[in-house]
Amino acid sequence: MVPLKMAEMWATMGSTIASFMFVWAIIRQYCPYELSRFFEKYTHRIMGSFYPYIRISFHEFLGDRLKQSDAYGAVEAYLSANTSKSAKRLKAEMGKDCSNLVLSMDEYERVTDEFQGMKVWWISSKVVLPTRSMTYYPEQEKRYYKLSFHKKYRDVITGSYLEHVMREGKEIRLRNRQRKLYTNSPGCKWPSYKQTMWSHIVFEHPATFETMAMEPEKKQEIIDDLLTFSKSKDFYARIGKAWKRGYLLYGPPGTGKSTMIAAMANLLSYNVYDLELTAVKDNTELRKLLIETTSKSIIVIEDIDCSLDLTGQRKKKAEKSSDDEMEKQNKEVARKEPKEHGGGSNSCSKVTLSGLLNFIDGLWSACGGERLIVFTTNYVERLDPALIRRGRMDKHIELSYCSFEGFKVLAKNYLKLEIHPMFDKIQRLMDETEITPADVAENLMPNSLLDDAERCLSSLIEALEIAKEAAAVKKAEEVKDNYKNEEENSKLQ
């Protein structure tokens, strides 16, 4: 009789639980989101009074999701290295060399960790938030890690253990960091609220300062400046300045400005953010892009003189310009006008000089830290003085025509030569004419398997002689034009 009653009791209990689960599922499905959150909130409070465990959540994004949480990234790196062996469900991503897999906890997976004899539990989870319009925006997901531990370990876990996790996680992230090259997308094409405004590829540019065609003294000066900056966190904090530094790279086309940026990134192991100003809608979007960048990065705006109307040409300068300079400026404006006003990407951009200046050294520029801002231009004289003054562009680096010292670097890179009888003639021609490192490299590049060192050097000598003759003809024409102008001016007088 007793076993029968027990069986009936278990059957009744099972039926009650099944009914409760069914009703709860219906409530969760059709109950308004705000009401369900209300019940969950007070249920957690009641359970917290009797539950002996403490939980700490580490969310992927904080606030308005403007920037990914550093704590979340550190926890993710720590768990991938220390607990992936005990997890049963893992997610895999390709490593830097595209052959090794990096394993980390899959969603809703639970693992155990021990610290000084204390046991803690980590859970990978997410919350899916409903959106107003399912047509235009997908469901938004909030990912987070949850740490659980007994309340008697509170002081040790919130102190020593979390410091250990953050420190080891950051070290793992730096050790496994995959350098990336980012570019911004037009604001109207940002895919969804939860996704970043930058797209990226792996940064694999091989340029180094050793392979750059530049005088050794100047090269070493730049290297010392970069290394000093990267180790000056305490110094910048002591003097009350944001930990950033501006570099202005200027010089004729083909003198190695882009190569210099790649060498900087490889020297410091920084990410590169190639900012296309013409794709930025306005100053607000420019600030959002800045917030999305990480520390240990280089923000690059190439050919700043051609990006929007930021050159700051003053009326005073225009009035003082000579007729020839005015004509040259008018031709330049006519050349740019179709791009800036004719329905191109520039036509929708409302980024102003003031917005760009605030981007460089305003209040928002201090977020993140350890950041280089690099401008490149072929015509430094066209830039507004406020844009390139010291304090914004702290170091001005002129990349000019190739010197003989630069040629020797290229000859070693391309031909594996450190000395050759033709070097004397090349040095003499280089002293008499101007040629860019890009042109030198092009002539030293073997075009077929039959091209040996002597043939490449002969090609360079021929190019130098042609450049010398062209320069002489141009100079003769300039002298002739000046003589004509002087005669016309004397007749008018």
Image: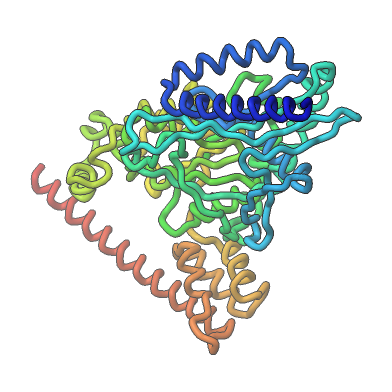
| Residue under the image location 49 percent in, 21 percent down | 363
Left or right for 392, reference 328: right
| Residue under the image location 50 percent in, 63 percent down | 437
| Residue nearest the observer in this picture, 138 or 110 | 110
| Residue under the image location 32 percent in, 62 percent down | 475
Residue 402, relative to residue 33: is it above or below?
below
Left or right for 82, reference 276: right
Q: Residue furthest bottom?
A: 450
| Figure quadrant of the C terminus | top left
Residue 17, relative to residue 42: is it above or below?
below
- Rendering coords of residue 50 (x, y %): 73, 12
| Residue nearest the observer in this picture, 414 or 148 | 148
Quarter-of-image position of residue 306 = top left
- Rendering coords of residue 166 (x, y %): 73, 31
Residue 412, relative to residue 100: is it above or below?
below
Q: Residue furthest right?
A: 117
Residue 328, relative to residue 466: is it above or below?
above
- Rendering coords of residue 191 (x, y %): 38, 42
